[in-house]
Amino acid sequence: MTLIQHIQSIYRLLADDRLGSLGLFHIEEGRVVTPIADDALSLFAYRSKRADEVIPHSAIEELIYAIKASNGYKGINHIGFCYKTASKEGAVKAIAKEASSKGYSVYQEPSIDDAAWIFVGNLSDVTSPLLEFLPHEGKTEDKWIDYYLPHIQFDIDTGMTPEEIEILVKEIIRKPFTPYSIQIDGVTYIQRVNLGCLEGVNLMLDISTNNRDINYRKSWAKLA
């Protein structure tokens, strides 16, 4: 599969077309179309140096079906695009301008890493799926940089515990360091599965745990 085919396949497996209905995300003529860019992949000027290698489609399919059959699957929380930019501030302003011109609101979640966490959509319904843009500025000596820059993440909401997700992932995806726990103050909010890399773009499946409260979105700063 090509990168665009793989993105489309994962999106179809999740079987949640709310982003499409909201006009936030669709795939057309080999492009990932969003309100921010007619081809979101064009944001990825910097590409990972990882060799093309992805978890087999059959394993991804099995994992997603198992999650959907488990405790409290709620669908897509957001689809995110993390990429390197010359100016994080400039990128945030451009996202806000482009999104607001098309009638979408823009929010920023506080972060302590090198990327700005910007969300596009509408939170009049706090459960609505969003797009996330994470412009990343500056040089880094992180040896893992090519494993997370750039990446597309499919973030899904579940009612599963961190332990339930870990057991399930390890049964199906037999890879070292998989899943990777994303924690704050020792609490696991996300179990991340790195699905691999294609055409210099990493693909992530972020599986939320029952520790994440979607109402936290209400505390985000509205930029536009």
Image (cartoon, rainbow, N blue to C red):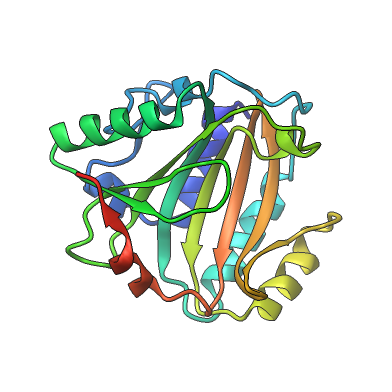
Residue located 76% across and 37% down the image? 142
78 sits left or right of 150 in the view: left
Q: Which residue is more in the foreground, 155 or 123?
A: 123
Q: In terms of image quadrants, where is residue 129?
A: bottom left
- Against 105, residue 151 (above or below) is above
Q: Residue 41: where, in percent of width, then height?
A: 47, 25
- Against 140, residue 78 (above or below) is below
Q: Residue 198: where, in percent of width, then height?
A: 67, 29
Number of marks in the image? 0
Q: In terms of image quadrants, where is residue 188?
A: bottom right
Q: Residue 205: where, in percent of width, then height?
A: 59, 53
- Against 162, residue 30 (above or below) is above
Quarter of the rendering occupied by the N terminus: top right
Residue located 35% across and 34% down the image? 92
Q: Which residue is more in the foreground, 134 or 53?
A: 134
Residue located 47% across and 56% down the image? 14
Quarter of the rendering occupied by the C terminus: top left
